Amino acid sequence: MSNTNSLLTIKDLYASVEDKQIIKGLNLDIKPGEVHAIMGPNGAGKSTMGYVLSGREGYTVDSGSVTLGGQDLLDMETEDRARAGLFLAFQYPVEIPGVSNLEFLKASVDAQREARGEEAITSAEFLKEAKIACKQVDLPVSFLKRGVNEGFSGGEKKRNELMQMLLLKPKLCILDETDSGLDIDALQVVAEGVNSQRSADRSFIVVTHYQRLLDYIKPDFVHVLSGGKIVKSGDASLALELEAQGYAWLQNAPAEDELEG
Amino acid sequence: MSEWLESAITRAQNLNDWLAPKRAHAIELLTQTKWPTRKTEAWRYTPLRPVERTKAGVVSGDANLSPESITGLEAIELVFVNGRFDATQSAKELPTGLLVSLGQDVDSAQQTVALNAFSTIKPERHLFGLVNDALAEDVILVSVAEGVEITQPIRISSLLSQGAESHTRVQVTLAKGARLTVIEDIQAQGDTLSTAFVEYDIAADAHLDHYRFALQTGTNVSIGGSHFNLHDKSKMHSSIVGFGSDLSRLDTDIIHAGEFADAKLNAIYLLDGKELFDLHATVEHAMPNGTTEENVRCIVADRARAVFNGRIHIHRDAQKTLASLNNRNLLMSDKAEINTKPELEIYADDVRCAHGATVAEIDKQALYYLQTRGVSRSKAQVMLNFGFINELIDLMPNAALAEWVRPIIRERFAQMEVK
C-alpha cells in the first residue's frame, strides 16, 4: 500500500495504553496534499491514534511501523516528530497558566526553525505574524498575552490550536475532533482556517465523530476506524452513508475488541 | 562519639595559637556531645555517614586553585585554599573604611576584642560550628567603619582540591550605618570536607547584603553556617543558592537583637541524583517591631533529598513582630524526597506570623503539549516551572550576581529528568 511518494505510512500498527491494546492492525497511507477523514464510534481508538503518532508518554507501540516523509516516526522524541512536520490539534487543549500564549507560540516556532537550520525570527516580526494569525482564526489579539488556553472557552481553545497550526506550517496536521463542542459559526471559522492551509504539500487527518465538519472540509478519503483498525474506506460519500446508517453495520470486529471510551 | 570527631579533637588539641581559649571551650563541649543519629532531631533526615566515611584530610602544599571569575563583578577577593588564607590571591588594597585582617597578625588588644566576639552570634548547639571553632586556624576579621558604604562586594571563596579538608572562619562587623555586600562561595572538587562559618554583627542602621553559593556537587561534604546579629533598624538581605552533594548542610541564624530590624532570606536549591541539601534556618525575634521574610524554593529530582527546617521563635517581648515563612517545592520524580518542617514558637500576643509549605509535581500533560509543538523537553520544563525560582533570582540586589547565577541554575534544571 505504501510507496515512496507517501507522506505518512502506517503499517500493521498495534499500540497499547496501560497494557490495554487499543490500536490493532492499523494501516494508513497518506500522500502529500490529501485530506483523510477518520470516523468511527466512541472508543474506536481515534484519539489514541493521534497520541501514538505524537509519542505521548504511556502510549506504547507493540508492533508495526510508521514513517513520516520516509523517516521512522516511532523512533523520534515527541518534539522531533513536531519538528519533522507533525502537528496534532488536541481535542482537549491543555491549559498552562503562567506561560503566555505568545511566549508559547514563539518558543514553538523558534524550536522548529532552529531544527530546520533557519534563522531565528525577531520578536517584533513574530508578533506581527501572530497578530495576523489571531485575526485569521477570529481571536482577539489580547489572547496572545493570556496564559496558554487559560480560561479560554471550548471554541477559543480550538481556534488557538488552529492558530498554532497556521504559525507552525506543518506537513501533516491531525485534527482530533476539532469540531466537538463548536457551534456552527465557530465550526465555519475552523473549517475556513483549515481550508486556507490546504496545499499540495500539506496533508490532513481529520478525526471526527460526525459528518457535519466534512460539509465544510471536503475529504479526499473517508475511513471508518473501529476496534482499533480501519474497517472500511471510501470517498466523501461514505461519510454521508455513515450519517444515515450509523456505525453499527460496520462493527464486525469480535466482542473482545469492544473498547474504552 | 565517632572516630572522625575523635581525631578532629586530637588534631585541635595539638594546635596552639591566639585562639586557644576558644578552642579549648569548643573541645570541652565537643567531648560532651553525643554524635548525632537518626534520633537526633537536628540531623534526623541528614545522616552523617558521609562524614564518618570521608577520605578527605589535611592537605599541605600548593593546590593551584583560583576563584572562578564572575562577569561584571569587581569583588574584593578573600581567598582560602584548602582552609588556609591565601594572601597572594586576596585583595591587597582596600577602600577607606574597610579593614580586613588575619587574626594572628593583629595586636593582642585587638585579638582580645575578637576573641570576646568569637562564637557569640553562632549558637553553640551547632555541632560542626564547634568543630569549626576547634579547627579553624586562619580567622579573617572584616570590619566596616561607621557610616561607610563599601560599594564593592567582598567575596570570600573557599577552594578545596581533591581530598582536602578545610575549616574556614570569618568574623564580619558592620559599624553603625555601614553598608556592605558579602558573597560566600565554596568551590570544591572530588572527595572533600569543609566547614565554613561566618558571623555577622550588624550595628544600628547598618545594611548587609549577603550571598551564599554552594554549587559543588558529587562526593563533597560541605557543612556551613551564616549567623547574623541585627541591631536597631538594621537590615539584611540574604540569598542562598545550593546544589546538593553527598552531604550539604547549612545552618543560618538570624537574631533580632534590636528593634525595627528587617531580615530577608531567600534560598534556592536544586538537587539531582542522590544528592542531599539540608537548610536549617532559625530566626530569633528577641526584640519588638522586627520583620522577617523567608522564601525557600526547591526543585528535587531523581533520588535526591531536600531538608528544610524553618524555625521562627518570637520571644515574649517581641511585640509587633511581622514574620513570614514560605516554602515551595517541586518534585521531579517519585523517588525524590522533601522533608519540610516549619516551626513557629510564639510567646508574644501582638504579632503577625504566617507560614506555608507546598509540594508540587511537574505537569506532564503541559510538558507533552509543549513537546508536540516542537519545544524540547528540557526547554519546556524550564518554561513551565522555572518561574518560581526566577522570582527569587530577580530579588537579588546585585544584578551581576543574578545574571551570573541565573543561567547556571536554569541549565541545571534543564538537565533534570522527569521520572
Image (cartoon, coloured by chain):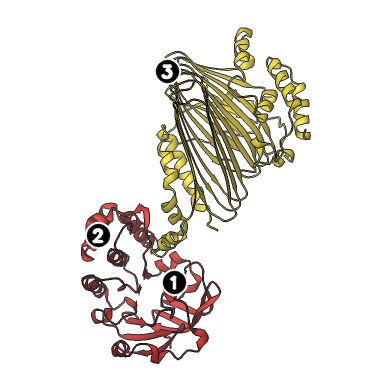
Chain colours: A red, B yellow
In the rendered view, tell whether residue B114 sits above or below residue B239.
above
The C terminus of chain B is located in which quarter?
A: bottom right
- Dot label at residue A129: 2
In the rendered view, tell whether residue A178 sits above or below residue B363.
below
Q: Earlier in the sequence, mark 1 or mark 2?
A: 1
The N terminus of chain B is located in which quarter?
A: top right
Q: To which chain does the residue with label 1 belong?
A: A
Q: Quick one: A224 or A71, which is closer to the camera?
A: A224
- Distance between mark 2 and mark 3 Cα atoms: 54 Å
Residue type at mark 2: give it.
Answer: Glu
To the question of a shared chain for discs 2 and 3, the answer is no
Q: Which residue is mark 1?
A: A51
Q: To which chain does the residue with label 2 belong?
A: A
Q: Residue furthest front?
A: B349
Label 1 sits on a secondary structure element that is helix
Q: Which residue is mark 3?
A: B205
- x, y percentage for residue B390? 42, 43
Q: Quick one: B227 or B197, which is closer to the camera?
A: B227
Residue type at mark 1: give it.
Answer: Tyr
Residue type at mark 3: give it.
Answer: Asp
Label 3 sits on a secondary structure element that is loop
Circles 1 and 2: CB distance less than 8 Å?
Answer: no
In the rendered view, tell whether residue B114 sits above or below residue A181.
above
- x, y percentage for residue B365? 44, 62
Task: Confirm whether residue A120 shows in the render.
Answer: no
The residue lying at 27 percent from left, 76 percent from top is A198
Task: Confirm whether residue B246 shows in the render.
Answer: yes
Q: Residues within 10 Å of mark 1 (few under 14, many from 20)?
A: many
To the question of a shared chain for discs 3 and 1, the answer is no
The mark closer to the camera, 1 or 2, is: 1
- Dot label at residue B401: none
